[in-house]
Amino acid sequence: MTPKERINGYQLVYHRPDTLTDNPTHYCPGCSHGVVHRVMMEVVKEMGIQDRTVGVAPVGCAVFAYNYMNVDMQEAAHGRATAVATGIKRVLPDRYVFTYQGDGDLAAIGTSETIHTVNRGENILIVFINNGVYGMTGGQMAPTTLLGMKTTTSPMGRDVVTMGHPLDITPLIAQLPGALFVTRHSVHTPAAVRKLKKALRLAFEYQPLNKGTCFVEVVSNCPSGWKMTPREANAWMEKNMFTAYPPGDVKLPPPGLN
Amino acid sequence: MIRGTVLVAQEICKGCELCVIACPQDCLGLSETLNKKGYRFAMLTADSCTGCENCALVCPDAALTVYREPKPVRRPATSVQGAA
Ligand SMILES: Cc1ncc(C[n+]2csc(CCOP(=O)(O)OP(=O)(O)O)c2C)c(N)n1
Ligand code: SF4
Ligand code: SF4
Ligand code: SF4
């Protein structure tokens, strides 16, 4: 049967959103980055805010996010995405402004910008992709790397004495008075993807209320950096990453908001 | 059971298999041949698809389009006109 014959009389129930460009991504097979891009752009499409959304891309594997997300985008220097987003939001307060950052970008070189942006309660959305390594540069240890986890710069596994503890930055962010909505998700199952989508939708909807920063962490995989197949990486993530970084809401907006 | 089907954008699929493990009907697999990028691509391997969208939800490359047969419309028994 040809594809045309197969769909004859059937209804279209899911297709790629046109808020993603047609460019194939450079991401490795199975990488969570692609799923998060797609879900974010589905939300932008469903809310009808494509022409009012501005994203800030990081340094890291998602450095080319502007080639894939079909909204206005600005590239930032490594770690500085939330500072750049602050400027954009203050000049264009009616726009939906988000940053998209890995753990090396947000929780290592950009820790200072991240904390101060949220402490100022900037009305932006920060999307934080936590895959426990520096993917782009070849799988080096990140602040979020788990204890015992082998990376190219912790070949015997991360140990506390010389390398410190894994940095769980999301609960720290939640303590800041400027944080409105802080939540942690993943994209390894259809149910998890649905939950992330709901959270991103809420985070975008809160933005015009000018009540503070929304922070959405996505515990992610890095099949290449972890030297696993995508299937193995997702299973490993569920077993190990979720222990250190359990999915769930960390801070909810005060009741009655909206 | 509602019937569905999926179309795979073969040239952007990277053969990651995440759709294969997400499919509750076990009706997806990877091709024997390679696409231009050198990846095996996802394909339907059985006709048990229900159009549940699970595969599309987990696909990192937005390579899947999902279709479903329309819900059957109930017609009152007397409305058949001109029947022999
Ligand atoms: C100022 C500066 N320092 C260091 C680098 C090298 N560098 C590029 S990407 C990266 C880390 C990326 O890791 P992460 O943010 O976790 O993103 P991932 O690639 O894992 O998605 C580093 C250190 C750089 N490009 N610029
Ligand atoms: S190196 Fe890791 S984070 Fe980067 S694209 Fe590949 S799998 Fe994704
Ligand atoms: S729509 Fe559902 S049943 Fe059909 S291939 Fe995808 S996951 Fe399987
Ligand atoms: S999830 Fe997407 S990219 Fe991966 S094998 Fe299936 S269709 Fe291809």
Image (cartoon, helix red, strand yellow):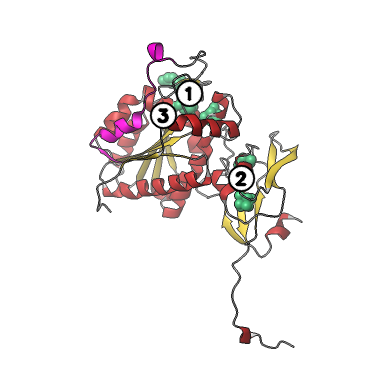
> Residue at image x 56%, y 31%?
A233
> Residue at image x 48%, y 23%?
A134
The chain holding disc 2 is B
User: Which stretch is magenta?
Assistant: A159-181
Residue located beneath label 1 in the image: A134
The chain holding disc 1 is A
Query: Looking at the figure, which quarter contains the N terminus of chain A?
Result: bottom right
Queried on whether the Cβ of the residue with tag 3 lies below 8 angstroms from ligand 1, the answer reads: no
> Residue at image x 37%, y 22%?
A109
Residue B48 included in the magenta stretch of the image: no
Q: Secondary structure at mark 2?
A: loop
Q: Position of residue A154 (x, y in %)?
A: 48, 14
Queried on whether the Cβ of the residue with tag 2 lies below 8 angstroms from ligand 4, the answer reads: yes
Q: Are marks 3 and 1 in contact (CB under 8 Å)?
A: no
Task: Give amino acid for label 1.
Answer: Tyr
Residue located beneath label 3 in the image: A244
Residue located beneath label 2 in the image: B63
Q: Secondary structure at mark 1?
A: strand
